[in-house]
Image: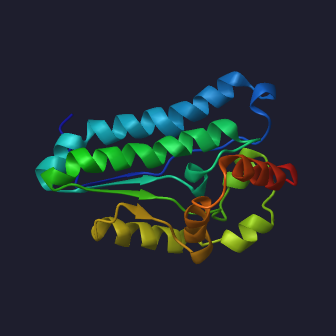
Amino acid sequence: MGVEVEVVVNNAGFGLFGNAVEMDRAEQLAMVDINVRVLTDLSLRFADSLIKNRGGLLNVGSIASFLPGPRMAVYYASKAFVLSFPEAMRGELGPMGVRVTALCPGPVPTEFQDRAGFEAGLDSAILNVSAAAVARAGYRGLMSNKRLVMPGVGVRMIPFLLRFAPRSMVLASVARVQQKR
């Protein structure tokens, strides 16, 4: 391809709100293509260059990466991949000098909510971190070779609290939040 890169940032993606079985299947598969397939392709496509340049790979996930997501099932599942994949790639590329970081913010006030088809709720207000702050945190995390970056105190509390809650309770809680949208 002839392109030499030092850093790859995979930040493209979208979500869809509604019951998976009731939404357009082609549109949901397009979401998987963007959120998973394209991210994987770009990560692998530039791996040789990242190794050569001892560069970095930053993949943008979400707090959704840690949760089941009724009413956004495919989106949440795709973001679970975006957490798992860079962790595994870190194990493969890290010994070769490549920094690999997963960035998992909470709701960020962007056009994402409009595209997904829902209005931001109380959870968005509590977990909200600006796009600029998320970008800074991601950059700093990648440069300091952090495995995971979670901007905002509220967002960092969620995975910690998940350790103490049965998965069925987590599912019910997320379902209640999503039902209010």
> Nearest the camera: 124 or 156?
156
- At 69% from the left and 44% from the top, the residue drawn is 69
Q: Position of residue 24 (x, y in %)?
A: 74, 25
Task: Residue lying at the far top in this picture: please name it.
Answer: 26
Task: Say if 131 sits above or below 49 in the image.
Answer: below
Q: Is residue 62 left or right of residue 140?
A: right
**Residue drawn at (56%, 55%), measured in percent from left and top?**
62
For the N terminus, which image quadrant? top left
The image shows residue 165, relative to residue 24, as above or below, that is below
Q: Can residue 4 be seen in this view?
A: no
Q: Specify whether residue 119 is in view.
A: yes
Query: Is 7 positioned to the left or the right of 123 in the image?
Result: left
Q: Position of residue 81 (x, y in %)?
A: 48, 41
In the image, residue 76 lies at what x, y percent?
A: 62, 44
Residue at x 76% of width, y 42% of height? 17
Q: In this view, does 53 lie above or below 124?
A: above
Q: Is residue 35 left or right of residue 170?
A: left
Q: Does 146 sit above or below residue 168?
A: below
